[in-house]
Image (tube, grey):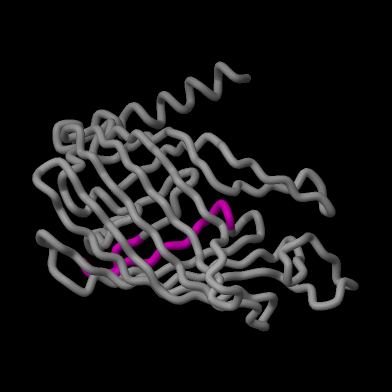
């Protein structure tokens, strides 16, 4: 069975890898979408196992949803509007919302039930601005921040200030190394830092369609072995395969 799955994957990926291999180039602005102010071109589609489904509505506007999370009962949707032209510095606005419809929490973020006072389905809505600037031919740096709200159902529970920063080292036309950091400041509790994360990822463009990435993450990766227990990993692997058409 495993052998058949491997053969099937090879047959599916081989044509995509061979298409336009010479045209794969991380130095094209639209090829660097994660953690930057860049947007997909109109009609372009990007999707991966962990990467959201992103569609270029226009050259300046893209929309993203996450099919895997949606199937798991955790819908995610985001809009990005690039408000400036590409250049040494590029600016975009990002509006995003995520919810969990499969687990309830109390205000402290602990697992809860329908009978737990003040419990509800958690969600976050945020609006951020991102600035991306070039430093020579091989480096990109991005910084961003903006307001957000944590929700339990329709009830706001805390105000947030989202902050993020990224560095991309463009090793060559098909290889890059990325460092991405993000976190939330709880404006309702003296600026306490919530959900911090740091990701270090190496990525390679096998062609202008197929991309692979892998690395390590630090922060708070939360998982639930059962409905009333929650555990946190502070060091965890990150990996993805994604496609762009």
Q: Residue at x 27, y 69 (%)?
A: 92
Q: Would residue 130 be counted in the magenta stretch?
A: no
Residue at the right extreme?
A: 115
Query: Residue at the spot x=50%, y=64% of the render?
Result: 184
Residue 45 relative to residue 172: left or right: right
Of residues 72 and 27, which is closer to you in this image? 27
Percent position (x, y) of residue 34?
34, 52
How many numbered marks are there? 0
Quarter residue 143 falls in: bottom left
Query: Where does residue 83 sit, x and y in percent of width and height?
Result: 21, 74
152 lies above or below 194: below
Residue displayed at 17% across by 72% down:
84
Of all residues, the one furthest to the front in this rendering is 190
Residue segment shown in magenta: 55-69
How far across and down, in percent of the image, does residue 4 sit?
A: 55, 20
User: Residue 71 vs residue 17: left or right?
Assistant: right
Q: Nearer the viewer, residue 80 or 56?
A: 80
> Up-down: is 175 above or below 73?
above
As drawn, 200 above or below 135? above
Please identify the quarter of the rendering in which residue 90 is found.
bottom left
Q: Position of residue 87 (x, y in %)?
A: 10, 61
Residue at x-position 32% and y-position 72%? 93
**Relative to 119, is 178 on the left or the right?**
left
Q: Residue furthest bottom?
A: 155
């Amino acid at each position: 069975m495993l052998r058949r799955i491997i053969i099937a994957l090879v047959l599916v990926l081989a044509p995509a890898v061979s298409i336009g291999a010479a045209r794969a180039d991380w130095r094209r602005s639209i090829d660097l979408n994660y953690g930057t102010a860049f947007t997909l071109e109109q009609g372009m589609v990007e999707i991966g196992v962990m990467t959201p489904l992103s569609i270029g509505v226009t050259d300046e506007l893209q929309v993203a949803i996450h099919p895997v999370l949606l199937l798991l009962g955790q819908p995610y949707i985001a809009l990005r509007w690039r408000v400036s032209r590409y250049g040494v510095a590029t600016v975009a606005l990002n509006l995003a919302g995520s919810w969990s419809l499969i687990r309830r929490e109390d205000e402290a973020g602990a697992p809860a039930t329908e009978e737990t006072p003040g419990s509800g389905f958690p969600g976050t809505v945020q609006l951020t601005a991102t600035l991306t600037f070039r430093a020579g031919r091989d480096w990109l740096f991005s910084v961003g921040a903006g307001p957000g709200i944590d929700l339990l159902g329709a009830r706001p529970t805390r105000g947030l200030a989202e902050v993020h920063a990224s560095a991309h080292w463009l090793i060559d036309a098909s290889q890059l190394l990325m460092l991405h950091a993000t976190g939330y400041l709880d404006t309702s509790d003296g600026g306490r830092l919530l959900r911090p994360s740091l990701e270090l990822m190496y990525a390679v463009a096998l062609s202008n369609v197929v991309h692979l990435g892998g690395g390590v993450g630090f922060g708070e990766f939360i998982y639930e072995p059962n409905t009333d227990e929650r555990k946190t990993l502070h060091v965890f692997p990150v990996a993805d395969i994604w496609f762009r058409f």
